[in-house]
Amino acid sequence: MENDNFDKDLEVIESVKHRSKDTKERDAAERTRKGFFAPPPIFSCLLPILTVSAIILISLLIIHTLDSNQKRDVKIPSVIGLDAESAEKRIREALLVPEIVASSQYNEEIPENCVISTVPKGDRIVKEGRKVFIQVSKGSIFAVVPDVKGMPLSQATIKITELDILIGEITNEENSIFDYDSVISTKPAIGETVKRGSRINIVVSKGSANSSTASRATSETELVETPERTYNVNITLPHTADMKSGNVRIVINDVDGERIEYQGSHIPGSSLSYNVKYRGKAKLSVYFDNDLILERQLLES
C-alpha cells in the first residue's frame, strides 16, 4: 500500500516537472517569435553600472558646455598716466573693449593725450568683453602767449587761436619799425601765461606816417579796382558719435592776405552756412577741430 502511494507521488512530481519544462519552452518560443531574446545574466549585473556611468557622462558634458559659454572674470588694468594708444592696447590685452570719450578735460598733472581716468576704475574685477571708457587729458588749461611779434596779423591770429586762445580787441598804431599790418605787441604780453579760452588784445602797425605812403596808396587803389565778392560756405560737419562739440574755423587767403573769417563752436553732424568775403583769387579752407574738412579755390568772377 505504501509503495503504491510512493509511486503515485513520484508520478505527480514528474508531471509537475514536465509541465514546468513545457511552460518554459513555450515562453522561450513566444519570445523568439516576437524577436526578444533574454539578456545574458552578466548583462543584468552590468546594466545599473552602465546606466549610472551614462548619467555621469551626460552631466559632465552639460557642465562643460555651460562653463565654456560663461564669460570669465578679468581685472581692469590701471592705465592712468599712460598715453591713449598704450592704454587701449593694455585694456584689449585684458580681454576688454576700450573706448575713448570725446569730452576730454584739461588737467594740470596729466600731460596732453594721456589717461586721466577710466570707468570702471582700474583694478576692478569685471566680466571679459566689457567696455572700459577712457578719459583723456587735454593738458594744462594754461597756455603761453606765442611770439607773434612782427608777424602779419592773419598769421598771428591763426597761431594764437590754435592754442584755444581767443582774439580780443585789435588796435592800429603808426610804427616805423614794423611793417604795415604786422603785430607790434599783445596784451597779455608774449611769453605770459594765460587761461585757454581767454582773450588777448593785439596792437598792429599802420607803418610810418611818412613812409610807404605811395606804396600804400597804390595798394589801396588795387583793392578798389579788385571788387569784393561773397561766397557762401554751406557744409555739413563730420559726425562723430563721441564728440559733443568742436571748433570750426574758416580761413581765407586772398590779395588782402590770410585771415580767419569765422570761428565758432558747433555740434558734429550739424550744418553750417556762412558768407565769406574775398578779393581777387582766393583760397578757402575750413577746419573742424584743426582737421581740414574743406579746401576750395575761389576765382575772381
Image: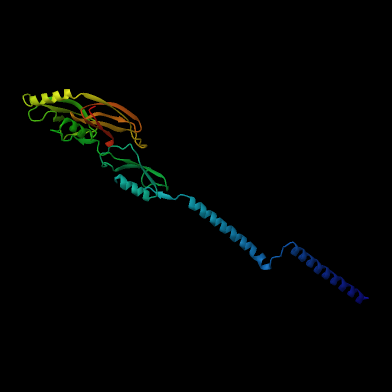
| Residue 80 visible to the viewer | no
**Who's the residue at 14% across and 23% down the image?**
221
* The quadrant where residue 49 appears: bottom right
Q: Judge left or right: residue 233 versus residue 156.
A: right
Counting from the top left corner in percent of width and height, residue 113 is at: 28, 42
Q: What colour scheme governs how the chains and residues are painted in the rendered image of this protein?
A: rainbow
* The quadrant where residue 267 appears: top left
Counting from the top left corner in percent of width and height, residue 210 is at: 5, 24
Counting from the top left corner in percent of width and height, residue 279 is at: 20, 27
User: Which image quadrant: the N terminus?
Assistant: bottom right
* The quadrant where residue 39 appears: bottom right
Q: How many marks overall?
A: 0
Counting from the top left corner in percent of width and height, residue 54 is at: 59, 59
**Who's the residue at 17% across and 23% down the image?**
225
Residue lying at the far bottom in this picture: please name it: 3
The residue closer to the viewer here, 9 or 14, is 14
The residue closer to the viewer here, 224 or 110, is 224
User: Which image quadrant: the C terminus?
Assistant: top left
The residue closer to the viewer here, 271 or 241, is 271
Residue lying at the far right in this picture: please name it: 1
| Residue 25 visible to the viewer | yes
**Who's the residue at 59% across and 61% down the image?**
53
